[in-house]
Amino acid sequence: MGNCCLFQIGLENFIIRGLDSIAGHVNYICKLKQTLPTLSAALQELTAQRNDRQSQVDLAERQLKPFEQVQLWLSKAETMITEAEKLIEDGLQQMNNLCLGGLAEMLQEISDHKSTGVFEKVAENQPAASVVVRPVEQPVALESTIQKVWSCIADKDVGIIGLYGLGGVGTTTLLTKLNNKFSTTPNVFEVVIWALVSKDSDVGKIQDRIGGNFGFSDDSWKNKSVDQKAPDIYGVLRNKRFIVLLDDLWERVDLNQVGIPKPSQENGSKLIFTTRSLEVCGEMEAQKKIKVKCLETEKAWELFRDKVGDETLNNHPDIPNLAKQVAKRCGGLPLALITIGHAMVCKKTIGEWKYAIEVLKRCALPKLENKEFLFLKFSMKCCLLYCCLHPEDYCIPKRRLMEYWFCEGLLNEFDRISEAQMPGDNIICSLISACLLENDGEMDGEDCVKMHDVIRDITLWITGKFEATENNFFVTAGAQLFQEPDVKERENVKRMSVMENKIEVLNKTPKCPSL
């Protein structure tokens, strides 16, 4: 009987212990099922918080320097998110094995890390880049273009930026103002380098101008070859976030040959250059090409008036109207407006202003002259000069222009005009890319181009001066003439244009045997 009692008591204890154990496992499973979705929710919150902080840092990186503490928090959050995602992926297996594993521990770590992710600021102002401030004129209407370029500088996908436009339009001034802006505006660059390239600069000269920024100017440096200088420049720049500003490119510059690391997303550096040709932008692999346009009439007058000064303009009631005519002859080119504006400061009589207008009608603008056309091949230059036979602002149909060229023998390597169509189109595209012609929409269903007023003035001057032997032109197109012009002193002209006038009858035939 006693043995039976002992056996019963032992059985009861065993059952009780078994029930306790089962209850514990059931409770464990419940905790596991509760912890997994809790961890998933915490992971979502941490991911959202990480994304918010990363967006703030990305925005700040454009002009500010992120705090190392914030960068460290983001790095740790990234690691925790990866580990938590792995635990959640394995969550089902963890429940099958009745194992909480690191879920609870990870949940606590995420909770703790979230609480430390509140920052009053994510970045600080960083020092301006090392830059040499350059003297610059203060023309109006560049602000919007500067802002456009500055936005491109902040774009991580843009490493090379090309600024192109007609000579005198202000590309150098724009590049100079950008250079100086780096000295006052917080940015991510360690060094800003300026180098004038120009038409006659070779790789060695460009290297010398860039090397001067780093103190490479002694005789030992100057005596090095191009191949020896390139590694020196590359060695300085490869570990820096730099911006190189190259002014006045006439052809492609080989960055590797110079020693400039190619700007990329990885190094965060930038190259900005100016040129007169869109084709050069393509050859330099510019991701962003920005055309610098001439000033609108009101802005051009504002700049010209500023350079002439109120004292001169108010000296006679007729001078302002005459001054506006002079400003108009400048065609919106800042260089011409500034140069002529300075020249007219002391001109305080009506006669002087009227004389200035007549001179500008007959001559090329100061400081421009023949420079615009130096890079053109001879055949292309002849095609361009032919365009000045048309009146000012005239809409020239492309097909008609090519027919003229063909008949004049400017496309004489082809026997048929149909064969000359493609090279003719190519010449027009090249002249447009060089900002010497402009697209002008359609007229009677035909694509048209036109010449900028200043370019037309220069070509007329060239045909009357430099090219007088080969291309002596006599042009009175659009001059509102009622009778034929007097050509007694121009009997050697080879091409004459009197189109768009009001001449109804020729009283006498011009004696020009070379026409």
Image (cartoon, rainbow, N blue to C red):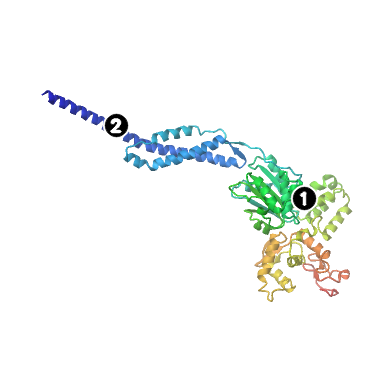
Q: Which residue is rendered at x = 40% and y = 37% of the image?
A: 39
Amino acid at the residue labelled 2: Gly
Residue 330 image point, x, y percent: 78, 55
Residue 451 image point, x, y percent: 73, 61
Amino acid at the residue labelled 1: Trp
Q: Which mark is residue 101?
A: none
Say which of 360 and 131 sits in front: 131
Q: Which mark is residue 301?
A: 1
Say which of 362 and 169 sits in front: 169
Say which of 93 and 238 sits in front: 238
Q: Which residue is rendered at x = 81% and y = 63% of the image?
A: 462
- On the question of residue 54 being in view, the answer is yes
Residue 75 image point, x, y percent: 51, 39
- On the question of residue 438 being in view, the answer is no
The quadrant the N terminus occupies is: top left
Name the residue carrying label 2: 24
Q: Is residue 384 above or below residue 88?
A: below
